[in-house]
Amino acid sequence: MSAYANAKALGRDAVLDKIAALDLYESGVYREKMTDHIAKAKAAAEEEGVQLDVVAALNNADTDMVYLQLLREVPEKVLEGCAIAALAAGAQKAVLTVPEKEGELAASLREKAEELGVEVVCEFINIRKNQTNLLVHLASCADLADAFADSYEPGICVSINGEPLKKVPADAKVSDVVDLTGAKAVQVGYAYYTPEECSATVGELNPANGVIRVLTDKNCIVDDAAKKTLACKAQSCGKCVFCREGLIQLEFMQNEVTQGRGKMEFLDLTSEIGEAMCYSTPCSMGQQSAKISLSAMSKFAGEYEAHIKKKNCPAGVCQAFVMIYIDPTACTGCGDCMDVCPKDCIEGKPKFIHMIDEFECDRCGKCVEACEEECIHITTGKVPKLPDRLTKVGKFKKRR
Amino acid sequence: MAVITIDGVKLNVPDGANVLDCALENGIYIPHLCHHKDLNPLGSCRMCIVEVEGQEGVVTSCTLKAKDGLVIRTQSDEIKRLRMLALELLLAGHPEDCSTCPKYGNCELQMLIQYIGPKTGRLKMRVKGFKENTANPLLVHDMNRCVLCGRCVRACNELRGVKVLDYHKRGMETYVGTLHDKLLADANCRFCQACAEVCPTGTIRDKLATTEKKREDYIVPCKAECPAHAEIPRYLRAAKEGDMEKAIAIIREKLPIPRILGYICTQACATQCKRNCLSDPMSIRLIKRYAADKDIEHKWRARSKQLPDTGKKVCVVGAGPAGLSAAYYLRKQGHDVTIKEALPTAGGTTAYGIPAYRLPRDVIAEEVKIIEEQGVKIECNTKVTKPAELLNEYDAVLMAVGGTVGVRLGMPGNDLPGVLLNADFLRNCSMGKETGMGKHVIVLGGGNVAFDCARSAVRLGAESVHLACLEAREKMTADDEEIEQAQEEGVVVHPGQTFERITGEDHVTGVDFMKVKAFYFDENRRAVIEKEEGSELHIEGDTVIFATGQKPDLNEESGFKLFRGAWIVVNDNTNDKQTSIPGIFAAGDCVYGTKSVVMAVQSGREAASQIDKYLGGDGDISEVLVDDKPGDPYIGVIEGFANEKACQPKIDPAEERKDNFRLFDHGICDEDICKEAGRCLQCDLRLQIHRPHTWGDYADSKEA
């Protein structure tokens, strides 16, 4: 018998009892006991005097979307869980919502969904239209299905460093589930943490989007935060001022820092806007997305300062701080670098020291690989004096 | 009920009421932008945040529901800081060129800036880079100015149910628009313009907005343009619902002879109808006619006003539209009213000017009967020659004698035998008398009266009928419909001609014309006509009819101060229609010249009100003839609404109509009438939408 059939056979009260007995939790941003979660939604619907629907979805703020793996790998589980949630809440309608861009995925689910009486739609959750509905995370749906197939395993479903999803115990320390060797920072959910903070449990830090990811010396926190914030900006529906405009400002500031145009006042402005976003927006999109910048800036202020004051990206990721130059004392004037440069920004002629136009150069590094003399260098540090006009090989030092 | 406390002020408000609305209505200003009283709260702009006692942080007052014992504060340093931040964020994507914005001075965002204070300039500004969209009729969209308050989206979806506007995203920018950026008409927009009404900024604007007219007048132009300000959208709505009883009652609140108007009104209203910008204007006249034709039971009479007799006597001279209207309302105000009419029946211009093929005589008779039934006495065949003497018998007199004498233009041959005047010709024609018309008729003039002459001549058996006028075709004052139908009947129209001379020795033989090269008024407002050389045109004919204006049959002997020797001078054409003889008033064409029947009706109404006041009444002639609830704001989706064409009336072909004076326009049929009325944009619904509360309103009241 399927999980849904089992649940149906048990009846609503017994289903709720079992959910309570197994101590199921709502997954994602709004982590709480599933029984409380259901009760709250029912109370809201009752207050308004309306019928409650069950809407299963990812959190709006989720740009990593690792939980979509569940829909791809065990779709029937999620759909059944959704139907079980509807049964538990006494809802008339159950809807499974997938992100707007996942039309194909939605289409692949419809047949099975129909059997279970679940509607599948592609949209961004409008939190205002769902105030009296029971919103259930996709991962919770999978848990519910497991619970009634007697295969439930307690814990939080996570993807560690991009690996497939697996359950980890909520009371395990983060440092115990992930290898912190060489870690500079750890992304847990929507925030960055220092390795020291990882002595907290998985449940406490709550990887709400299923992501636990180690960042090492090779990762630039600023660059990482800028990219994530950009993804959030693209995903925000733009209806609320603080989310829409706040993300635009946060992303701008993060990006400016990576571009070497950062200012120290960005730190204060980021916390002012970011903190306000957390309580001035109605859904996870605004509430969680701000935490990326907030946690990065507050916990890794040194890295920001290096970018802003020292004009240096310690990880060597931010290309604005990276310089590629041709060592004038070693260049043989062979022209190999010129041939491979996609931007055509290397000047030179045979037997003359070649020069890179640093404004045109986009630091792709192709010339570095092409140089047999190994005289083209990438650095984030100081660049030696370079010729300012075409100079014959070997003449550079003499001319000075 | 719940008692809530806002900034220390205790308010008694309904339980569960919107706290922001409660504050605003009780004189407490809380800044707000995305909130609008008629729309569901959104809580996105965060301007209306307040602190609730016993609760941490701030909440939006627009989403807060009143509960007994609720205590809130609208001001604190934290609130101020967050409002400022919200404003700064909003303005980061808004252009900084207030002074060039068409909404300058009426912009809610601008007033919010004045209230909250100037922004600091610490945020990154950006230009959204949308192009102003002027491709739609009636509305302009400048999405660069949009602050995404979402009012228009809610108005379009929740208030109107039209569901055209929604949020969309282009690249990283959210904007409001139609699906796939379709033109509004193609997206089934109903052009109710609620979006423009609720837009707080200069983003969605009326193309027709102007500072020269009152707001209501450009929003509901048909009603504004009607001289009597008939409630056109209201009666069209009743007609749409098939409730013709209600429609005629609404019409009759302003128009005492609606059936006559239903046949012949020049409907200035339709020329201003906003539907002109979409497809065809509303067939307002024909809908009025339909409702009036169906009005057999006269249920509206049950609520018709009749004040007790005052004992005052009023004499109205002339039973035309102005006289009949004035008499009707004067009688309803309780006065004893007698109309003295020179001709054998009442109706004036409508009976002796407008031909029967346009206005059947029984229609006039029935309208007159309603007025007589109200208690107005009409004495026909009674020409008044000494109006001043009427004051011996009456407490007040109204001159409504119209313009009954045709104007003969000064030109060679203008008094030859065979030259006729419009007024005489049409009167004789209406009375079945000999008109003196020959076989080949040339009508001089380009107005509706000229066409009445020309088409009557066709019906009287003229072998050829030419009509010439000074104006170019597009400047002719006659209705297009009239011109086209005349042409179908064989009238040859010659626009843009000067009248050189009427030829002939002892009888008319024709008219010489020259083509007009340019016709304009110089700086002294004198008409200047430039002729085209070598453009001489001679049209042969044995009859010339001057249809170049009419004037009242009055001279100095009448005792009135006259304008240009014929028109009666009144103190003020709108507000004081008293003539140079105290106690005698004047209204209609005899005051302001030949205009329209509906204008005469309005002139008569105004005169009635003024005479009532003169006689000691309150001058209030208004009446409510039917209970009417406000129109349903939820107009819903109608596919292809904007492009719907007008339903055409049934018109007899030219061959069947040109040899008789029978009515040839049978109006809109039963099947089409509701559909036609349903095409109305219902511009008036927009006036139901509440005007915004701005800081200025509150600041003023405090100072005062």
Image: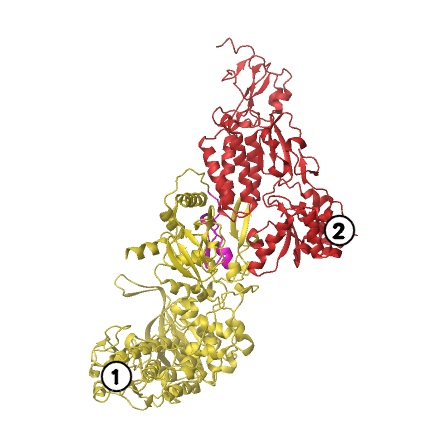
Question: According to the rendering, which colour does chain B have?
Answer: yellow
Q: Which residue is mark 1?
A: B397
Q: Amino acid at mark 1?
A: Val
Query: Which residue is situated farthest in the right direction here?
Result: A1
In x, y percent, where is residue B570?
24, 75
In x, y percent, where is residue B452?
40, 79
Residue A98 visible here: no
Residue A358 vertical position relative to residue A191 in the rendered view, above or below? above
Residue A340 vertical position relative to residue B563 in the rendered view, above or below? above
Residue A186 visible here: yes
Query: Could you say which is closer to the camera, residue B273 or residue A234?
Result: A234
In x, y percent, where is residue A212?
64, 35
Secondary structure under the numbered disc 2 in the rendered image:
helix
Q: Is residue B419 toward the left or the right of residue B244 in the image? A: left
> What chain is tagged by disc 1?
B
Q: Is residue B43 toward the left or the right of residue B311 in the image? A: right
Residue B133 part of the magenta-drawn span:
yes
Q: Which residue is mark 2?
A: A3
**Segment tinted magenta in the rendering:** B127-155
Looking at the rendering, in which quadrant would you find the N terminus of chain B? bottom left
Q: Amino acid at mark 2?
A: Ala
- Secondary structure mostly seen in the magenta stretch: loop
